[in-house]
Image (tube, rainbow, N blue to C red):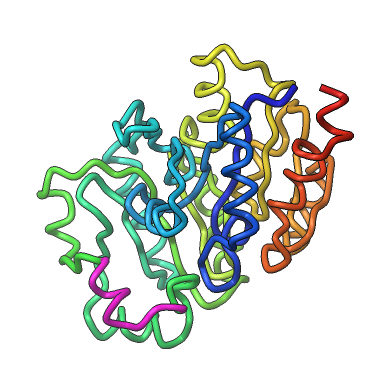
């Protein structure tokens, strides 16, 4: 019997417009009515994860920033894993050599050391995907632009760092360079980014800890995702691991099952087929 379903957001629960479809929302509500726990596992910050959930009236616990923070049903921070300051400095040095743009996700929101002109240029060249779906003003309002020398004087806790570049080859080269940094987890959710967290802050590890605290076994969990940053949970020994129809090929190879795309209500289809259908419920 499935007691917990862990679902990624962008490219998975959310359609290409960045919203939860009515069918997906109804499937989640049916799950929760049956007593099955619905857990969001996202690379987004907690605040950004709440926006589409609130639009559909969905409440859930949230693993955010790729496992760096866990928030409970009531919005309380239950656990966190942060970078060491030296790790951040090493990442910064490496990324600057490759001309990357940074999104530092911190205890006080998102920071970047880009100038206003550099940040606008990154937006106009679609480097800030998926934020390119929003107006420049809406994206800019989410960031604090500071000088590099200020970044470490603000008393920030660093949870996740997105390193952004227009060239996938440059990001591949940078990924090799980042292997020199100890205790670093590197993943990707779009072709323009690398998502960096402490090695102990990954979706799979956070999901395992969350489930263990609730006495839920791995064979009582379903997980759904589409990107490389979902691999750590889709490679676990769960009952069902499901890749979206729009998932990266590497993710499709990792998961046990394949559902429809995020614009075809793939999350709802998986839930309906494997959990809510009469056949699935008869299997227990």
| Number of numbered discs on residues | 0
Q: Give how far across and how far down residue 84 sits, in percent.
A: 31, 36
Instruction: Name the image quarter holding residue 244.
Output: bottom right
Q: Give how far across and how far down residue 173 sits, in percent.
A: 58, 63
Regarding residue 182, the answer to whether it shows in the image is no
Q: Main secondary structure of the magenta part?
A: helix
Regarding residue 114, the answer to whether it shows in the image is yes
* Above or below, 130 relative to 24: below
- Left/right placement of residue 255 relative to residue 100 reads right
- Front residue of this view, candidates 209 and 2: 2
Q: Give how far across and how far down residue 153 sits, in percent.
A: 10, 49
- Front residue of this view, candidates 220 and 182: 220
- Front residue of this view, candidates 180 and 197: 197
Query: Which quarter of the figure is the C terminus placed in?
Result: top right
Range covered by the magenta-colored residues: 133-142
* Above or below, 45 relative to 74: below
Query: Which quarter of the figure is the N terminus placed in?
Result: top right
Residue beneath the point at 67% across and 43% down: 231
Residue beneath the point at 54% across and 73% down: 17
* Above or below, 101 relative to 105: below
- Left/right placement of residue 68 relative to residue 217 reads left
Residue beneath the point at 45% across and 38% down: 60
Instruction: Name the image quarter holding residue 169.
Output: bottom right
Q: Give how far across and how far down residue 194 sits, in percent.
A: 51, 58
- Left/right placement of residue 201 relative to residue 10 reads left
Residue beneath the point at 65% across and 24% down: 3
């Amino acid at each position: 019997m499935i007691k917990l379903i862990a679902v990624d957001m962008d490219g998975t629960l959310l359609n290409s417009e960045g919203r939860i479809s009515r069918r997906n929302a109804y499937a989640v509500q049916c799950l929760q009515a049956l007593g099955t726990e619905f857990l969001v596992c996202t690379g987004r910050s907690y605040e950004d994860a709440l926006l589409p959930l609130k639009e559909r009236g969905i409440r859930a616990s949230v693993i955010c920033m790729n496992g760096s923070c866990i928030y409970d049903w009531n919005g309380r921070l239950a656990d966190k894993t942060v970078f060491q300051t030296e790790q951040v400095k090493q990442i910064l040095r490496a990324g600057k050599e490759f001309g990357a743009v940074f999104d530092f996700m911190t205890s006080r929101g998102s920071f970047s050391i880009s100038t206003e002109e550099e940040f606008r240029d990154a937006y106009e060249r679609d480097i800030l995907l998926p934020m390119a779906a929003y107006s420049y003003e809406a994206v800019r309002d989410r960031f604090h632009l500071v000088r590099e020398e200020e970044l470490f004087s603000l008393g920030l806790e660093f949870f996740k760092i997105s390193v952004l570049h227009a060239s996938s080859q440059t990001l591949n080269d940078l990924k090799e360079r980042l292997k020199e940094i100890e205790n670093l987890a590197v993943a990707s959710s779009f072709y323009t980014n690398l998502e960096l967290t402490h090695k102990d802050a990954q979706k799979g590890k956070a999901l395992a800890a969350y489930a263990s605290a609730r006495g839920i076994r791995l064979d009582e969990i379903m997980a759904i995702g589409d990107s490389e940053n979902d691999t750590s949970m889709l490679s676990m020994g769960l009952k069902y691991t499901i890749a979206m129809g729009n998932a990266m090929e590497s993710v499709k190879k990792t998961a046990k099952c394949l559902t429809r795309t995020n614009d075809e209500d793939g999350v709802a289809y998986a839930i309906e087929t494997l959990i809510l259908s009469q056949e699935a419920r008869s299997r227990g």
